[in-house]
Every structure is written in structure tokens, then in C-alpha cells.
Amino acid sequence: MKPIWIVDDDHSIRFVLEKALAREQFAVRSFASARELLGALDDGDEPQVLVSDIRMPGMSGIELLGKVKERLPGLPVIVMTAYSDLDSAVSAFQGGAFEYLPKPFDLPKAVELIRRAVDESVREEVRDSGMAEMPEMLGQAPAMQDVFRAIGRLSQSNVTVLITGESGSGKELVARALHKHSPRGSGPFVAINTAAIPKDLLESELFGHERGAFTGAQTTRRGRFEQADGGTLFLDEIGDMPFDLQTRLLRVLSDGQFYRVGGHQPLKSNVRVIAATHQNLEQRVREGVFREDLFHRLNVIRLRLPPLRERREDIPTLTRFFLAKSAKDLGVEAKRIGDEALARLVAFDFPGNVRQLENICHWLTVMAPAQLVQAKDLPPEVDGAAPSAAPPTTSPAPLAAVTPATETPPAAVVGASVPVAIAPAMPTDVMPPAGGSAPNGHPVWLDDLQREARRLLESGQPDVWDTLTRQFEGQLIHTALDITRGRRIEAAQKLGIGRNTITRKIQELKLD
């Protein structure tokens, strides 16, 4: 279990809580300021529960709560506050805090409150781990079986691996499998997308920096190489790494030594490097934008991940899997796929690969009008479109663009991210009639939704799916909170979602 973190500028408060929690066999870590705590988060550490004071010099507990919730939305946070602060704290922390601990507090009651927060945190982790226990990767096609065999052969090796494949084919998931089944499996797996981070920050992200190395460097920070010590560092989209940083990376791969930005002492890190790219690195070398010596250093073992169109026999299994996963994520009954609809999916070329298939399955779970998905229910990029036609992307970037390293590419693997931005046109019949109906038999609100979706789509509005989904979710949560007079746990129960889920959604949708 991770430690309980306490942040308070009052040493006596920290001391009393540390001793009381230690007697209850809890691991504890204390901080004298919010900035000190945020530095620990930057280093990759995480608490099981956070106990924070409100009034602290430098950064208040209110500011700290907002920053922590951005990174760890499900983390239970207990706010310590004086009686005179309680009214303002309650209004300021709507949806953020797990509970309030008034000062001066009764120590046994404080320990009991922290224990309840720990129990809640552990229950959330168990719920999340249920997905992780399902199969890592799916695929019966010969091309995927070759990938599985390669992972097995490489499992006991520390050799550098270069994974190539189109965007959305699941390169990071293969890297995670290589790490999990290797002797380093108990160590950290650290992923960074070298194309998603600005050039000026990438060096610091990789190698860390010393305090005062540049404007804003107020503390010493460990880089990804240090964080991955004893484990695996996954460098996604390595083909887009700036040329000057390629030289520093080559040095680390050659002798294992590096310097933090602004540092003068060499550091060593025992790291296995796995790199991935959707680009042709040989072509990048010929163009003079990728170092040839770095290419050969990375290209020790190359593992090619096939696009989905080269493993069409896996599409039925993947479709049923993603329909079940989406239903579980949304708390609804899983849809079934009809034979004709499945045949059209199998015939489609899927430029976005497995990520696009998962997005379509999620869309069908929400939008298909009946439990059995028919061919007419498929989104327009599949239904009636030529296989070579480029479908809507899952983000404003092109399908061949890079994916942020914090986002796991959902290549036939459980734990893939839920799609948030696919914008197929609304089918004619979205849901069966319910409540008030228009002359066509549909609920009036669905006809209004269809008109709005058509207006946005025809006007070329970007992110239509994301826009309408946020409005829909926001209205559901707002109505439930209105009915329960702001009681979030009760509202979550009525909606059929978890307490942490409604808290996270309120923050994401800015409903505070």
C-alpha cells in the first residue's frame, strides 16, 4: 500500500498525525509545504490518501487540491481547517475533498477518518485492477502470433527493441508486454512521447534538471531515465526526436551515463530502452533528420506490429471484446453485433487500426438503437464508405500523428483509453421511442439532438463528438445533483456511477 501524505506548515500537527498513523501500521510521508509535495509528485511518487491543511504559506491548500486533482482525480483528499475557515472551505472545495477535518481535531476520530479514506482508495484500485486482470492482447492472425512469439523470445533479454507500426496499432502495449514478462517486470515502466513534448522541455523531461538550471527550475527534478532505473523506458515516436537531443540519447545508450540539465556530476541509470515509431527511420536517416548511428543503436531487434487490415480474422473477436469493454465502462448491457454489420467491419480497411475499431465499438454502445447492432447502425465511415476513404480521426491531429505518452494506444488490450472524440453523423434512428414522441416516433429530445449534430457536422465544426458528449454528461450530472440537493454520493448512486467518477467528471466538465 502506498503511504499517506500529510502536508502542513505546522510541525506539531505533522508530528502528532505521523505518530498516530504509525501506531496503526500506516506508512506516512510528511511535507512542510505544497511545493515540496508537488515536487514528490513530479518524481513519480503517489500517495494512498492526502491530508492537507488549508492555510499554508506560498501555496494554499485550495490551490494544492486543484493541482493534485488534475493529476490524480480519484485520490481521496482530507482537508484540515480551523472552525473559522469551515464555511469558506466547504464552498471552495465542492467536489474536491473526501472529507473535512476541523482543527483542533480529536486524534482517534482523525485516524478513523483517514482509515475510511484509505478503504475507499483501495476499493477504487481493486475495481480498476479488474480490467488489468483481463487478457493483455488478443489476436489469432498469423501476424499477431509472430508478435506474441517474439515477445516470448525477448522476455528474458534486456536487448534494445525497436517497435514499428502504424498509428493506433498498439505499439505501447507491446512495449508494456515486453517489460511485464522480462526480469525487469517488477521495476518501473516509464513512457514518454518524444514528439508530444516541446523541444525546450524534452531534455529536462528525459534527463532531469538541477535547481536554478533555467527560469522556473525552483527544485531539482529527476528525469525519466532516473525514474526508470531498474525498469524500462519506452520512447514513443522516436523518429520525431529533435536532432541535437539524439546525440545525448546516443551517449546514454552507449555508456549509460548522462548529466541533468545544469548538472556537473555524471549519473548512471540501469534502464532497458524500448523505442517505437510509425515512421520509416531508414528514410529519415537518408533525409538527414535522424542520426544513422542512433538508428543502428536502437535497431538491435525490430518488431513490426501489423495494421488491422493485415489481420482481418481478428476483427470479430476484437469487436465483441470492445463492445463488452465499452458496456462495462458505461455500466450498460453489452451490445451484440449482427452478421452483416460484422462483415462490413471485416471488409473495412481501418486507417486508424485497433484504436479506430475501439472508438467505433464505443460509439455503437452509446448510439445503436437496439441490443443487436445492424449494418444500418454503423457509423458512416464504415457504412457505405469506400474502404480507402479516410474516416474521422480520434483527435484534431491526423491519424498518422503521434499520441501523448500518457494515453495508452488501445491495440486489442484491456486497459485502453476510452475514446473521447470521434464524430460520425447521427444515424436516422438513434434510440427506441421513450417518453414524449415526435411524429416520427422518436423522443422529441433525440430529434433535437439529431438536428444539432447535423448542424455542427455540416458546418465543419471540430470535435463534434466531444462537444455533444460533454453537454450530455454535464446535463445528466447537473440534473442528478439538483434532485439530490448537491449530495454527490447520492447523485452518483442514482446515475449508476462511482463517487470518484462523478467527482472527476465535475472537474473535467468544470461544473463546480
Image (cartoon, rainbow, N blue to C red):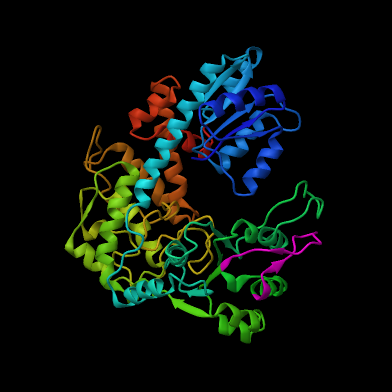
Q: Is residue 387 left or right of residue 471?
A: left
Q: Is residue 441 magenta?
A: no
Relative to 108, residue 418 above or below: below
Q: Is residue 385 left or right of residue 85?
A: left
Displayed quadrant of residue 178: bottom left
Relative to 509, residue 339 above or below: below
Indicate the position of residue 295 as horizontal and vertical percent values.
60, 80
Q: Is residue 10 left or right of residue 275?
A: right
Indicate the position of residue 409 as horizontal and vertical percent values.
45, 61
Indicate the position of residue 246 as horizontal and vertical percent values.
68, 73
Q: Is residue 266 left or right of residue 229?
A: right
Q: Nearer the viewer, residue 384 or 57?
A: 57
Relative to 235, residue 447 above or below: above
Name the magenta segment's main secondary structure. loop
Q: Nearer the viewer, residue 194 or 14?
A: 14
Displayed quadrant of residue 338: bottom left
Give the residue drawn at x 53%, y 67%: 401
**What is the span of residues highlighted in magenta in the rendered image?**
254-272
Q: Nearer the viewer, residue 287 or 116?
A: 116
Indicate the position of residue 379 as horizontal and vertical percent values.
32, 59
Give the residue drawn at x 66%, y 81%: 291
In the current view of this chain or complex, which residue is farthest to the bottom? 286
Give the residue drawn at x 28%, y 42%: 332
Q: Is residue 263 magenta?
A: yes
Which quadrant: the C terminus? top right
Tell me how many marks there are.
0
